[in-house]
Image: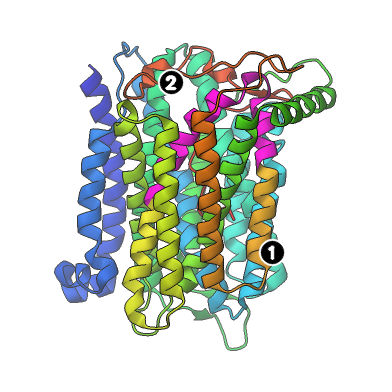
Amino acid sequence: MAVLVASKPMLAIGLVLLCAESVLAQDTSVETEGWAAFLSRDFYHMLIVPLMLATCVMGYAAKPSTTDEVPDGFHKFQYTYMVVWALCVAADWLQGPYVYALYAAYGFDSHEIAELFVAGFGSSLVFGCFVGTFTDKFGRKKCCILYCILYILSCMTKHFRVYSVLMIGRVTGGIATSMLFSCFECWMVSEHLQRHNFSGGLLGYMFGMMFQVMYLVAIASGLAGQAVADAFTFGPISEGSSFYTGGYCCPFDLAIACLVVGIVLIAMLFEENYGNTGSGDATSGLLENIQSGMQLLMKDRRALLLGVVVSAFEGSMFAFVFNWTPALDSETVKPPHGVIFALFMMACMCGASLSTLAGNIAKPGMRLLCTFGAGFLSFTVASHAASRTSGENLGLSLSAFLLFEFCVGVYFPSVGVLKSEVVPESVRGTVYNLYRVPLNAIVVGLLLSSISMTTCFRLNAMLLLIAFASMAFIAFAPSSSAGIVGVGNKDRDTELGKPSYDQVPADAGNSESVGGATVVGRRRVHADEA
């Protein structure tokens, strides 16, 4: 039964990949030169097949499964959610490779582009602090539809070569991103546990499938976005017009199509559910949580240094998101942004798979130490390549970026387990938000400063060294948070051998509460959230 449950959703995932292949097949350049010539066009395309094979092998070896009995109605619920999730997350991934490229094509300089990126990151950060409460009160189904509407508006603004219009799109897009990784999870957990009364083991399996689908959809989205971007000529609809179509605008149009279908499916297939907002004073409870969270950070150096780890690594990640497009820009080899993004996601999924497979060999702390060491090496190589002007360094830069994306794949599942061990349940959501304060400062400082790309990569390498040193202390130092006022005993997740999806508790739907808001699940931060 476990094999059956694990294999059927792969058919749905295969359909997503087939959709990308069908879009690629319509690319006139592919029809003209043939698949063999397409896959050997340049070193970017030559990496597609070997990286895809590695991704499939490692993904299959680490695929989620469950030994729980599968009740009637589970498969219908699973397929309904996964199809909607795949469409809505595809709309998010389709945009990632082309945001910087589109702004640059419109003629904006790097500082103006940085301001647009910071606006998207800032709106996501601010709204993310209370999106859980808003979702619980307004309704999860309504918020899923609102996510689609906000992202449609964001994608529509990409057609305008007007800075103020693009800024509005960045703000609505940032809000939508924060909703994507909260509303859908909250809806699914509530339906799974409350309406259908499915087991906690099956919930863990659902989360495993959810994030595996996310990575596979990201790969397919990169290839599909590349195909539509190449199929139509980029330019204004008329001479002197500020409204553009074709080229880099096409992936955003494809995202709109996914979102429109998503709205229809959500309206037809989802039932409304709400969170437990409680009867107390939410503001008072939130202030008490912030006070307890600050006490934890002042008394427990492991919790404080974990915040340093999160801010340093994820800050370098957001700076990387901003810089990879100009770093690979070349007149000799035009960068296929969608293909490059797909390669990044393949490397990231390989890292996530390795993190799962290595669960019975290395604890999260040791995995993170190795990850930060490899990340330091990647940015050291990237800074060396960026300091030289020769086009021959593109391959070196790409290799460094793929190594860092592999590190990103290892990082998120590993740090998720570590955070659950170090941060107490009673203030977990609050402390996670406090971790984002220095992260925000790092991102804004790196993006809005006038430093060169080489200097930025060197600073990223230093941030990885800081993360390594902090992680070393966390891995070998005892906890010191016992007895802190307002902080309960830590509910530590157990990690026994290979991570088991059957270890999700039956009350996982209420695993974190911040000001009455339910926060569930873990995610890999979207690359375009900065």
Callout 2: SS: helix
Instruction: Give percent across and percent down for residue 180.
Output: 56, 41
The numbered mark, 1 or 2, whose residue comes first in the sequence reads 1
Amino acid under label 1? Met
The residue to which callout 1 is attached is: 167
Q: Nearer the viewer, residue 500 or 95?
A: 500
Image marks 1 and 2: residues in contact by CB distance under 8 Å: no
Callout 1: SS: helix
| Disc 2 packing (10 Å; few <14; some 14–19; many ≥20) | many
Q: Is residue 151 toward the left or the right of residue 395 in the image?
A: right
| Disc 1 packing (10 Å; few <14; some 14–19; many ≥20) | many
Query: Which dot marks residue 203?
Result: 2
Q: Nearer the viewer, residue 257 or 469?
A: 469
- Location of residue 160 by image quarter: bottom right
Q: Which residue shows up at 43% across the image and 20% down it?
A: 203
**Quadrant that contains the N terminus:** top left
- Is residue 264 depicted above or below 316 in this figure? above
Amino acid under label 2? Leu
Instruction: Give percent across and percent down for residue 97.
Output: 46, 62
Q: Is residue 238 toward the left or the right of residue 352 in the image?
A: right
Segment colored magenta: 406-435
Q: Which residue shows up at 48% across the image and 42% down it?
A: 524
The chief SS type of the magenta part is: helix
Q: Which residue shows up at 73% across the image and 18% down it?
A: 484
Inter-mark Cα distance, 1 to 2: 38 Å
